[in-house]
Image: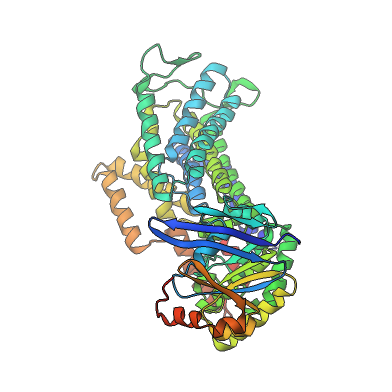
Amino acid sequence: MSVPLLQTGGLTIRFGGVTAVDQVDFTLKEAELRCLIGPNGAGKSTFFKLLTGQLHPTEGHVHLRGQDISGARPHEIARLGVGIKTQVPNVFNAMTVQENLWIAARHKHTPAYATELTDQILSELRLTAIAHKEVGQLAHGQRQWVEIGTVLAGEPELILLDEPAAGMTHEEVERTAELIQDINRSRALVVVEHDMQFIKMIAKTVTVLHQGAVLIEDDVSRVLEDARVRDVYLGKGLAA
Amino acid sequence: MHLLNGMRGALIGAAIAAVAILTAPLYIDLFQIMQLTVFAAMAVLALSLGFIWGYGGILCFGQTSFFGLGAYAYAVAAINFGDSTPAIALAILVPVIFATLLGYFMIYGGISDVYLGVITLTVSLILFNLVNSTAGDFYKIGEARLGGFNGIPGVPTFNLPGDPSYILTPEQAWMVTGMALILVYLGLRVLIASSFGRIIVAIRENETRAALLGYDPRIYKLITFMIGGAIAGLAGALYVNWGAFVSPTIFALGLSAQIIIWVIIGGRGTLIGPVIGCLLLQWLVTEIGAQQAMDANFVLGAILIVFVLLVPKGIAPTLRDLAMSRLSRDTAPAPTADATAKVKT
């Protein structure tokens, strides 16, 4: 069996008495698209922070193509090819859209090629019209797109998207879904999302987190029919 | 393209300033030349903070540490060598080494912004007390007696590189100081327009995002801090050359606070702002001092309050915004991307 792209084993983080992520075993194959869902506070964003080195696990490990990255710093993990769009957009506010993407592209490329790649991604994401606007002045939905563009400009091999469709119009959500499927042709993604319509549009395999632990991991249709999943989303307080 | 367009204005401005500096002795008397020399030395110091704070986002409250170390390094070296050229090199090198060590422990230790300000301020006060207590014959480096609170008098001033017997006249020292200011300014402009410059601004804007893109914010911040230390050290050498004297008050709180006021009033996020703020306020303080009607510190404080409340961006950015809105009103179409890029860099 080949080495999985991403694998966590017994991944756990505790803050004081709270176990935010609890013994998560998660495996992602090369070029896989995985959706990660769960109610508020299920530990999805914390899980992403553990994958990207923004937090370090209390126990367990994260392996990227077999390499242990559990204690690595964010920039080291980014250099190994992991890109993330965070839940609250992390962008360079006082810089233009073009500059945001350019900074991302510049890490791997020469200034001239970074400019070329930036222009290409700007037109793919239909951001060319606002390329020279300051990101701080944009609407939330547009900022989301800028951050997605920034992640793409870094050319990662594994892309983590934390609520990419939040704050977007219906049309924008559909475009985001198309974009994700497009990216997935060559690269692996993990997408956290609350919007079930959106999940139905893109998902194949879905992992459900609840109170920090994996509740179920299965095909999207089976997950959405699962009684336990409905219970945790409706807040019936499944005794874990 | 943007880079060239943006730099063209700076180069023209620098050329005009250079001509003004070189011809100034023809129509300004020696007393005023001396005055302008110390203003220009201080403006170099203002640029050092304007760079690390305005672009690197590092609020160093103790920029005088590097200024003072540069000044003392110059004084001690010039006395021992009898030649100012290696002394100027040491005035840059010693503060850079100190900035590297201090910066490494603060930045790699994960000290947050506010504490960085507190620590740098404390360091400058420690240096003040340390140097202040070096009175007596025991404290000397080679030929140079540190002299404690009395300082070091009679420091050799700049000589022609390679010819220690040729001491620069005050007019020539003014030209050197003025040209140093212009060169530091242009050097920083080039640096800011480079990839490094854009990356440090990105880190200032959002450190998390920069790290998630693969940039290690720590090394960029440390290099920024070191460059600031180098420039402040050079300013120290220029300052000692002006007065042929250095004392521990160079590390004192008053100057640390003044540098920050210069940058706030001139405008953060620009390079010309700190220079304008520094020249304007020094001129004002000198004028007030000459009239003896008001306390200079009182006036400085009042100006700071007025600026923080009414012109929070500072002089240079406010003037730029005014010019931009004028421009966009006069010529119907909105400012082009080139125009924005030009102003920003």
In which quarter of the view is residue A6 placed?
bottom right
Task: Name the residue: 64% across, 81% down.
Answer: A202
Task: Identify the residue at the far front of this view.
Answer: A239
Give left or right: position of A187 versus B58. Answer: right
Up-down: is A141 above or below B75? below
Question: Is any part of residue A207 visible from this angle?
Answer: no
Up-down: is B124 above or below B258? above
Task: Identify the residue at the far bottom of this view.
Answer: A170
In which quarter of the view is residue A125 placed?
bottom right
**Residue B77 at x, y = what percent?**
53, 22
Task: Name the residue: 66% across, 79% down.
Answer: A204
Task: Name the residue: 57% across, 40% down.
Answer: B180
Task: Name the residue: 56% across, 42% down.
Answer: B227
Give left or right: position of B284 versus B17. Answer: left
Up-down: is A94 above or below B121? below
Question: Is any part of residue B62 visible from this angle?
Answer: yes
**Residue A179 at x, y = what percent?**
67, 79
User: In which quadrant will I find the N terminus of chain B?
Assistant: bottom right
User: In which quadrant will I find the C terminus of chain B?
Assistant: bottom right
**Residue B151 at x, y = what percent?**
39, 23
Depth check: A198 or B89 in front? A198
**Residue B334 at x, y = what percent?**
57, 78
Up-down: is B214 above or below A188? above
Task: Identify the residue at the far left of this view.
Answer: B293
Instruction: Count every numbered label the image shows and give the total.
Output: 0
Depth check: B119 or B72 in front? B119
Colouring used for the render: rainbow
